[in-house]
Structures are given as structure tokens and as C-alpha cells.
Image: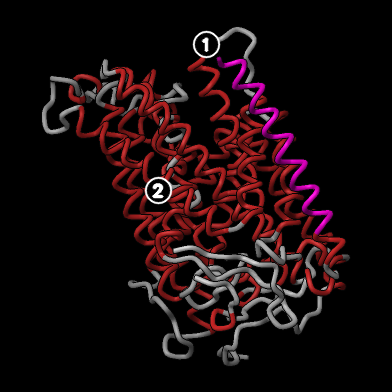
Amino acid sequence: MTITLEPVIHGDRVSLLRVLGPAHVWALGVGIVLVGEFTGWNFAADKGGALAALIVCWLVGLLYTSVAMIDSEVTSTVAAAGGQYAQAKHIVGPLMAFNVALFLVFAYTMLEVSDAILLGDTIVAKAGVEGLTHNSFIAATIVVLAWLNYRGVLMTLNVNFVITAIAYISIVILFFSVSPWTQGAVLKLNELVTPDNALPYGWIGVIAAFQFGIWYYLGIEGTTQAAEEVRSPARSLPYGTMAGMITLLIAAAMTWYVCASMMPWEYLGITYYPLWDAGKLTGSPLLENLLFIATLLAALASANGCINDAARAWFSLGRDRYLPTWFSAVHPKYRTPYRSILFLLPIALAFAFIADLNQAITFSILSGVLQYTFMSINIVMFRKKWPLGSIRRGYTHPFHPLPAIVLFCLCVVTFFAIFLGFGSQLIAMVAFYFLISLWFHFYRYKFVRRGDQFTMPWPKPQGY
Amino acid sequence: MWMALSYACWGISIVLALWMLYDWFKVDTTFSEEVLTSSREGELEAVSEKHRI
């Protein structure tokens, strides 16, 4: 199958191209997240021990399953680029929407920066050459992926599908290579995780571990950014998102089991490359090199998806005049938000060269958790304003409002955990969003065409 | 080899960045601002796509 693209103008309008299917949605979501199995989740072990890392794997899994279910229902109805931004605009209001879009842009741009730094550091660690720095690899990662995104969404997510699948299969290969059904041969879980060291800091360690437990699944909600580019949003988005979440739950469980069975928690909690280290510990050069390449591919896939998502959120802000409309330009040939991609490129480069990995990760996690907190409130308002049967839904999530309550409670716990580790950054970030909200309310909102921003053909909400 | 790869990364980054800047300039000078910013949220245009599959 070949697709020929020409710079044609569709009537009077140039829009994003609807060419994606469920597999691309899966590649976007899992691609962004999978890097978290290769680094990030293991710092939870440093906070609370190996067992705490497992407990948060399941509890944060519950948080993200709620996110995926809620997101699937709302986005199968609000199928627009910007994802949660468009949801917030229609369901809560413009100020919430502006904040949510900024959460999205910060979360994805900072995650992209973290991915690029990780990729550069991994190559430098492998090379072991004196004088070799990570800067060139960081620059190449960000610029090449921005170029790919600039040239079209179909190729971008085809590439993501392939590299994400390779990285995922490498985890499966590692899992089956260490004879997971036998203890004592390669895996030594019963020796490394004992009743004495399972929770070295008690239950407060489990709560503290939430901060990095987020890394098991951070970014799965990014699937909704593809809403305007999938052929069948009501079918593809729920299907791709839920399939992605199931994939990640399996990957997270396998990753914890292998790593906790091969490394003591004191080392697992500080290494930057838990899966690569596990590959080395098997003694097989093939597995070592496979996990090294998989670490690079996972970082690439994540950065690629993040560029895609951040650009669409920024583009949507421009299209609704929440930012200058200049950002809402679509490339007439490649049909991508090219100005938004180019605008965010130097910002990502600047952060990647000046920020360290921990800072970038923390800003990304903070923005993500702020967004999840919004989603728990958003779904309650959505069901109240437009009850079941009042509008067509591509997917209806079960047990409402239980997932929303679970999501909200787990977000509160995560905020507390972040406060324990990075309290000053949490306060600084909340202050930033407060000040930028004042700017939007008192200055920017007067440029917005209020009637134009609500585009969904829904009936009047209940109670209005 | 790693140092050569590092220099190659710089080279690729510069070439692709320049290409994007050139294409950006070309597009912005070829098409009007009204056309480039004409996308609207919520429009379903799958049936009117002109690309050939």
C-alpha cells in the first residue's frame, strides 16, 4: 500500500490527515510509556524497597487503568486534537482547558527531554570513551524525531510501532531467557526479597515510592492526541488505549519480577538501566546487547510520541486563539502542525542541554498527575451534564463513579509522595500554573472567539 | 568509532534543522496565512480526502 501526498487544498481548508488506525494509537501510547520500564520505575525501590516497587506497580496500575477507561469514554465522544484539552474545554470551561493544555505540553516536552538525556547517557555509558559527551546524541534524537514528525503522522507512528514492538519483545525474550518458572538457577527472588528487607522503610516507603511508580505507565493517556488523525475515533481510541494499558501491565509485572530477582534493592533503586543491567547479569552478550538496543529504542519511541502529542496540544491552543493563531498552521503537503513542532524544538533542546534528568522527570510527572486529577473531576461532570443515553459514546466505562474516586484518591497520595521528595518543585509548579491562569483570565481570553471554541454537536447540558 | 558517530549526529542534526527551516520558509511564502491556519476542530473530512491509497 502506498500513499501519495500532494500539496492539495481541501476545499478552503487544510486539516490534519485522518490516516491512523488502532495499531498506531497503541504505538503512540505504549511508545511513550515503555521507556519507563527501562528506567525510572526502579527508583521506587530506592524509596521503599523492592516490595514497595511491586505494590506501587499494581496501585499505580489501578490509577492508570482508571485513566485509560475514563479517557476512552470521553475521547470517544470528543474526538479532537488536543485530547484532554478539548475535553476540558467542552466539559469544564476555558480556564481549565488552558491549564490542561499546559499540563500536556509540559508533561510531554519534559518527558521528551528526559528520553533524549537517557539515550545520550546510555550511549556514553556503553562507549566508555573519554571526552565523549551526550550532547550530540541528544541533539540528533530531538532534531531527527522532530523532522520525522514534521514530515507526517503516518510515517511517525509506523516507525513508533516497529521500534516499540522490538523494545517490548526484548522484555519478553529476557523474561523467558531467565527461566521464570524456576527459582535458584538465574532468579533469586527468595534470597533478594526477604521479610527483613522487603519494606525497609515501612509503609511510608510505599507511599514515597508512588513518585516513581508513575513511571511504569506515564503517558498512556497521550493516545487521545491522535483523535483528529484516526480514521474511526470512536472505535480506534478506546481499543488502542485499553490494549496499550493491558500490554503495559504485563510488561511492568515481567520487568519487576526479573529485575527484583536479579539485583538487590539497594542497587536496583539507584541504577539508571535496570533492564540492561539484568541483561548483563544473565552473562549472555546477546541479551546484554539486545537490552542495550531496546533501551535506546524505547527512549526514541517515547520522545517521538511526546513530540507528536506536545505539538498537537500547542496547535490546539493556537486554533482556539488561546495562543496566537500563528501556531495553528497545518503544513499543506505533510498535513502536520509544523509551526508548533518547530516552536517546541529549540525549547526541548535548551532544557535537554541545561536540565538534569531528575529535574526533567519531576516536572513531567507533576504535570501528568495534575492532569489525572483533572480527569477524575472531568468524568463526574461529563456524566452529570450529559448522562448515558443523551449523546452517542464510542465506549462507556463500567462502575462509574468508582474509577473516578480511585483515580482522585491515588492522585492525592502521589502528590503527597512528590511533596516528600520534591516539595519545592511542586510548590513552584503550582505557583507557575496559578500565575499563568491569571494572565489567561485577565489578558489572553479577550482574544478568544467564545462561540467558535465549542465545536461538538451535543445537546444542551442537563441543568443549563 | 564513537567519536565519529558523535560528529555524524551533529552533522545530521544541522542538515535536518536547516532543511526544516528552508521548508518552513518555502511554505510560509507560498501559501496565504488564511489557508495555512484554516483547520477547524471537529471537522470530519475522511470522505473528502484527496490522497490516493
Please give the chain letter of the residue carrying mark 2: A
Q: Which mark is residue A128?
A: 1
Is residue A301 shown left or right of residue A99? left
Q: In which quarter of the image is residue A135?
A: top right
Q: Earlier in the sequence, mark 2 or mark 1?
A: 2
Task: Residue at 49%, 70% (x, y): give it.
Answer: B53
In the picture as drawn, the residue positioned furthest to the left comes out as A182
Q: Name the foreground residue: A127 vs A81.
A: A127
The amino acid type of the residue labelled 1 equals Gly
Q: Which of marks 2 and 1 is in front?
A: 1
Task: Residue at 46%, 38% (x, y): give it.
Answer: A298
Tell me where residue A236 appears, x and y as whole percent: 42, 69
Above or below for A399 versus A109: below
Tell me where residue A276 appears, x and y as whole percent: 38, 25
Above or below for A384 versus A213: below
Q: Is residue A30 magenta?
A: no
Above or below for A150 versus A3: above
Task: Residue at 66%, 55% (x, y): give it.
Answer: A311
Q: Name the foreground residue: B4 vs A343.
A: B4
Say few, some or many: other residues with alpha carbon within 10 Å of mark 2 (under 14 / 14 to 19 / 20 or more).
many
Tell me where residue A368 appears, x and y as whole percent: 56, 51
Q: In which quarter of the image is the C terminus of chain A?
A: bottom right
Q: Label 2 to label 1, Cα distance in Å?
A: 36 Å
Tell me where residue A238 appears, x and y as whole percent: 41, 68
Above or below for A457 versus B4: below
